[in-house]
Amino acid sequence: MCGCSFEIQNGEVLQVAEGICEGSICFDERGKSGFGYDPIFVPDGYDQTFGELSEEIENSISHRARALQSIRQFWLARLGSLDRANVRSYYDAPAARDFLESFRFSGRSTAW
């Protein structure tokens, strides 16, 4: 489980989200990518551990990706799109712009 929130500079919390990736633990380590529990965690719907899955797949289904996707959906619901002009016209706080710019359009859990 991953929890994340989006706050503006005055400390106001605009959105809180959680992401959950369910799966099972295997008894032997498999794969070399990732870190921590990745070589022993098999996400539901897959036969491979996170340590064996590609970074692209892991970053689209991980608990972090799901939490950040929820934050992204919050902004899309408010803005309609995440283009730079739309973001600036909606909320001209550096924290909001920086967040939306850094999480733009990629399938990764750390950037869109």
Image: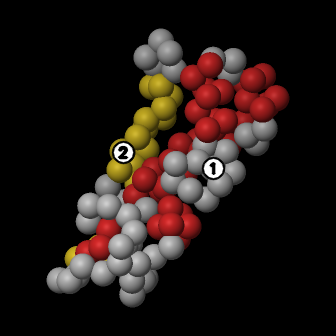
Q: Residue at x 30, y 73 (%)?
A: 39
Does 27 sit left or right of 85 as displayed? left
Residue type at tag 2: Gly
Q: Quadrant of residue 96?
A: top right
Q: Is residue 96 left or right of residue 4?
A: right
| Residue under pointer 2 | 3
Secondary structure of the residue carrying tag 2 is: strand
Q: Height in image: 42 above or below 109?
A: below
Q: Quadrant of residue 97?
A: top right
Quarter of the view holding residue 74: top right
Considering every residue shown, the one lying at the far left of the view is 27
* Mark sitting earlier along the chain (2/1): 2
Front-most of residues 54 and 103: 54
Q: How many neighbours does mark 2 have within 10 angstroms: few (below 14), some (14-19), or many (20 or more)?
A: some
The disc label shown at residue 112, or none:
1
Residue 63 percent across, percent down from the top left: 40, 58
Q: Position of residue 1 (x, y in %)?
A: 32, 55
Amino acid type at image mark 1: Trp
Which residue is drawn at the image coordinates 63% and 50% (left, top)?
A: 112
